[in-house]
Image (spheres, rainbow, N blue to C red):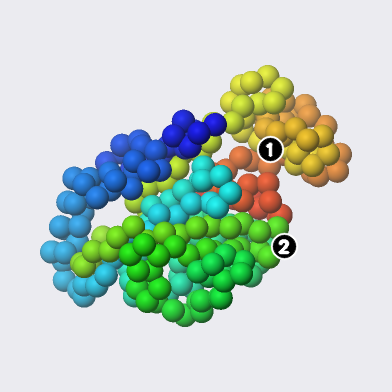
C-alpha cells in the first residue's frame, strides 16, 4: 500500500493529520509551532541552532518522526532518544554513519550541529544482528532557543498502523511471532483470537506498539517518547 494511503501522523503543536511528506511542509508554517518558537525566544537563556530532522525507518517508511534537536546536543543523546521511542530491547550496540553499513562511524560525542548540515542524511543502525536501520535527514535549521526544557522536541510522528486480525479482520492488538516465523502468516490478532490462539514455541503474543522494531529480537515496546 502506498505511503500516502497508510502512513499519516499528527502535528504535536496543532493536531493536524498529514502524510510524512505533507507534515514536513506543514511544520514550516504551523501557526501553533511559530507561536511556541516566539514564546521560547522571549525567554532568558542562550540561543543556538535548532535543527529539524525527518526520521524514518529505512525499510518501508511507514514509521517516521519529525524532531527538532538543539545543535549543542550530542549524537549520544539523539541515539538515546531513538532507543527510547523506537528501538531499545537488549542493550545492543548502535552507530551513526554517512553511508549505511559501509560508511565510516561518526563518534557519539560529536554535536548534532557539527554533522547535520542542510541536505545531509545519516544512517543509524541499532543491533548488528537483527538490525533496525533508521534514516535521519536534515530538513532545515533555525537560529533561536529550544521550545522545551529538553534538547529534543517531538514535533510529529506517524500514527500506529491499523493492522487487522488475521482470523476475523477486526482491529488487531497483538502479534504472534510463531505465526510469522513458522506459518508465514501476518501474525496480527485481535484480543479474543490472541487468547484462544495456540503458542507453543514463541511465548504469548506481543502487544502491538508504534515502532519499526516490533517483532524483532526481544523488542516489546513501549515505544513512548522519553519526554
Up-down relation of residue 13 to residue 169 (above or below): below
Instruction: Classify residue 74 as left or right of residue 106.
Output: left
Q: Quadrant of residue 201?
A: top right
Tag 1 secondary structure: strand
Regarding residue 37, the answer to whether it shows in the image is yes
Please tell me which residue is depicted at 50% across the width and 58% down the height of the picture.
135
Instruction: Classify residue 25 as left or right of residue 103.
Output: left
Regarding residue 151, the answer to whether it shows in the image is no
The residue indicated by pointer 1 is 175
Viewer-proximal residue among 26 and 188? 26
Q: Which mark is residue 129?
A: 2
Residue contact between numbered discs 1 and 2, judged by CB atoms under 8 Å? no
Viewer-proximal residue among 126 and 103? 103
Please tell me which residue is depicted at 63% across the width and 47% down the height of the picture.
214
First in residue order: circle 1 vs circle 2: 2
The quadrant of the picture occupied by the C terminus is bottom left
| Extreme residue toward the left, this view | 42
| Extreme residue toward the right, this view | 200
Q: Which mark is residue 37?
A: none
Cα distance in 3D space between marks 1 and 2: 21 Å
Instruction: Classify residue 207 as left or right of residue 78.
Output: right
Residue 42 location in percent, x, y?
13, 64
Please tell me which residue is depicted at 53% across the width and 70% down the height of the picture.
97
Residue 67 location in percent, x, y?
38, 57
Task: For label 1, count other residues whose C-alpha is less than 10 Å away and answer few (under 14), some (14-19) or many (20+).
Answer: many
Which callout, 1 or 2, points to the residue nearer the camera?
2
Residue 215 location in percent, x, y?
68, 46
Residue 66 location in percent, x, y?
38, 52
The quadrant of the picture occupied by the N terminus is top right
Up-down relation of residue 31 to residue 140 (above or below): above
Tag 2 secondary structure: loop
Amino acid at each position: 500500500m502506498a505511503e500516502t494511503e497508510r502512513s499519516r501522523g499528527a502535528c504535536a503543536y496543532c493536531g493536524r493529520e498529514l502524510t510524512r511528506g505533507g507534515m514536513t511542509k506543514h511544520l514550516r508554517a504551523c501557526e501553533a509551532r511559530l507561536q511556541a518558537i516566539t514564546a521560547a525566544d522571549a525567554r532568558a537563556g542562550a540561543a543556538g541552532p535548532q535543527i529539524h530532522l525527518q526520521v524514518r525507518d529505512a525499510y518501508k517508511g511507514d514509521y517516521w518522526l519529525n524532531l527538532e534537536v538543539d545543535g549543542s546536543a550530542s549524537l549520544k543523546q539523539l541515539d538515546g532518544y531513538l532507543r527510547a521511542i523506537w528501538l531499545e530491547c537488549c542493550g545492543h550496540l548502535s552507530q551513526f554513519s554517512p553511508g549505511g553499513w559501509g560508511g565510516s562511524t561518526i563518534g557519539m560525542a560529536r554535536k548534532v550541529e557539527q554533522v547535520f548540515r542542510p541536505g545531509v542524511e545519516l544512517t543509524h543502525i541499532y543491533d548488528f544482528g537483527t538490525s533496525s536501520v533508521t534514516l535521519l535527514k536534515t530538513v532545515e535549521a533555525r537560529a533561536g532557543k529550544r521550545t522545551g526544557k529538553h534538547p529534543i522536541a517531538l514535533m510529529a510522528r506517524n500514527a500506529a498502523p491499523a493492522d487487522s486480525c488475521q482470523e476475523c479482520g477486526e482491529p488487531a492488538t497483538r502479534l504472534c511471532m510463531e505465526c510469522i516465523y513458522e506459518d508465514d502468516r501476518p501474525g496480527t490478532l485481535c484480543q479474543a483470537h490472541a487468547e484462544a490462539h495456540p503458542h507453543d514455541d514463541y511465548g504469548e503474543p506481543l502487544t502491538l506498539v508504534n515502532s519499526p522494531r516490533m517483532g524483532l529480537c526481544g523488542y516489546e515496546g513501549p515505544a513512548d517518547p522519553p519526554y
